[in-house]
Amino acid sequence: MVELIWDPIVATAAILLGSLVAYGLLRIGHKISKPRPTSEKVKTYACGEELKPEETHPDSEQFFSPIRRVFKPFYRYIQPAHTGALNTYLLWVVVGFVIILVIILLTVR
Amino acid sequence: MIAHAPILAIVLPLFAAFLMPLVGLLSRRYNVPKACDWFAIATMIGTLLIVADMAPSVWNGQILVYKLGGWSPPWGINLAIDGLSIQMALMIAGLGTLVIIYSAAYMQRETRRDLFYALTLLAITGMMGIVLTGDIFNFYVFLEIMSVSSYALIAFKRDSNAIEAGIKYLFIGSLGTSLILLSITMLYSFVGSLNIADLGAKLAAYRDGALPVPTILIASLALFVTGVMIKVAVVPFHTWLADAFTAAPTAISALLAGPGAVVGIYWVARLPYLPFGLPVGIILVSLGLLSMIVGVLMALTQHDFKRMLAYHVISQKGYMVLGIGLGTLGSVLGAQGGLFHLLNHSTYKCLLFMCAGAVLFRTGSQKFDELGGLGKNMPMTALMFLIGALAISGIPPLNGFVSKYAIYLGGVEAGLPIVTAIAVLVSALTFASFFKAFSSVFLGQRPERLRETQEAPNMMLFPMLVMAVVCIVIGLLPALGFNIVGPAQAAAENSAGYIGHVIGGI
């Protein structure tokens, strides 16, 4: 059954071969058009301000802001519902229990 | 096979836990600071050898029934080890050993190591008992042993966050165990037995539809399912997990994410067949899907390394519950995928928590915004985190891909392709989340204060390396994993065989 699902050796060989070809293409590309970065080009641009490495770190909460926009209802309603308040969480357990009980009643009877 | 192996697998860590304070006392008196570490490691290696010794007999189709005190079931308490139990016991013992080895380095600055190991070994005793026992009340007792030890371990650091997390888990976890106790009480009042096989035999008429299911059985099942789901931490019963895993010592986060996950999923796999055998497939599929989605979306926005991993535990447990749920709807691949995912998840989630622990150990921070560029200082940790991250994201050829692929196919096999589509989407979001984690911690510019950061100690790297190798090997040779989960899935479904062996008293 396993062989029908997935042949990992062939797939791994294909992945490695693909990576090798991609690396080869990259090398050839670099040979044809050589990158010439000047010191100014590799500097972090921040309106002429000198930045410490700590300050160039992306905000981890906003890292995937487009995804936050796609799942807006979740981040507007579900995430703030995780208040950390124990009584709220215990209420969730009770609500969950009632839903499970209703589903079992509907399925069994 | 070692004589009395089933009971020794429980008793060895239990006695070692009770002896640990004495070992701690002697180690302080005679100035042997590593005595507790080595005693705990030796105990776990012994436990692993005992469990491994039982495995060949079980994989040959035998169900080991150990009668405590020589009393035959259902009158006496018994341990029953089938293919499902042995998979779980091997995982608890194997991963438990690696976690204890990791702890020897991670907890080296801690002066109360004897207390730490005593609680950890007690938690492992509880886990082992849960998966080996054939008695439902003993299951509750072992669950309490595991839970109470876990509450104390989560609050082990004694700072405000740890104590708050411990108390939260104490309240929600105790509610879960109370619901399970209430369910067992109802079952006992209705059936008059506490033996799982005997309960299964006596409830067979309701399972087959020969008799209408009485209300007390429905209430008992609902209470039991809710109690187990609190322990598994699927949505909406997941609320204790993120705080607990964030605040606990990282070795304990790894223990609860790896071997701890085994315990809940063991009962999720058992539940559709024994002792109730009533249909719970729709509940499992629904809760599994909900957990996958909520877990991964919560994980995406976290800025704490361990908290992000904690939300991924919820999401990945969703996959397992979903797979097992699909199994009850007729998909063999789904059920095998769910159990296989447990095997894989326990390995790479332990690995990922250990990597987070190594970073915390060396830098003193677990906030993404305070880290960066550590790939240069901690290349081995970075490499192993990358392997774990790719595995959890279901990237071929690592182990996570194989089990997720089986679950995807299980969705199609059960006639629910939408489930497969959601599972693939969640995998993509998981990858996105770990991309952020890897780039925030190991890539980019390194803060000035981290310039002198060193690689994790070898004692921490060793268990991480073992798990990274397991991720690669199982990914390349998935037959190894299927050879373990195949008998486990067959054993879970073979309730008649289990009942026959236990009541027959082999």
Image (tube, rainbow, N blue to C red):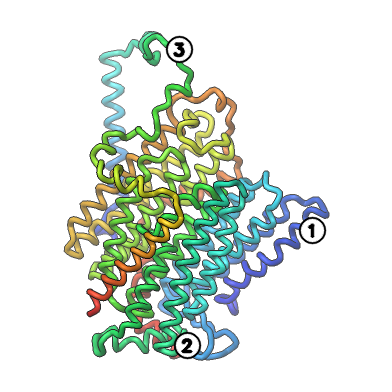
Q: Position of residue B304 (x, y in %)?
A: 46, 40
Judge from the rendering whether residue A102 lies leftward or rightward of residue B120; answer left or right.
left
Q: Are the numbered discs 2 and 1 placed on the same chain, yes or no?
A: yes
Q: Position of residue B20 (x, y in %)?
A: 70, 62
Q: Which of B219 and B209 is in front in this view?
A: B219
Is disc 3 placed on a helix, strand or loop? Answer: loop
Residue holding disc 3 = A50
Seen as rendered, the residue at the extreme right is: B30
Residue holding disc 2 = B506
Residue at point 33%, 55% (across, down): B291
Is disc 1 placed on a helix, strand or loop? Answer: helix
Q: Where is residue B348 in the image (x, y as percent from the top left)?
A: 44, 50
Residue type (three-letter) at the residue carrying disc 1: Leu
**As displayed, is residue B229 above or below residue B206?**
above
Q: Where is residue B431 in the image (x, y as percent from the top left)?
A: 33, 42
Q: How crowded is mark 3: few (under 14 residues within 10 Å), some or many (20 or more)?
A: few
Is disc 2 placed on a helix, strand or loop? Answer: loop
Chain letter of the residue beneath label 1 in the structure image: B
Quadrant containing the N terminus of chain B is bottom right
Residue type (three-letter) at the residue carrying disc 2: Ile
Residue at point 42%, 22% (across, down): A56
Q: Nearer the viewer, residue A47 or B133?
A: A47
Q: Nearer the viewer, residue A96 or B420?
A: A96
**As displayed, is residue B360 above or below residue A3?**
above
Residue at point 35%, 84% (across, down): B496
Residue holding disc 1 = B26
Q: Residues within 10 Å of mark 2 (few under 14, many from 20)?
A: few
Task: Say which mark, if any, is on residue B364.
Answer: none
The reply to whether residue B198 is in sight is: yes
Residue at point 39%, 62% (across, down): A93
Mark 1 vs mark 3, CA separation in Å: 57 Å
Q: Are the numbered discs 3 and 2 placed on the same chain, yes or no?
A: no
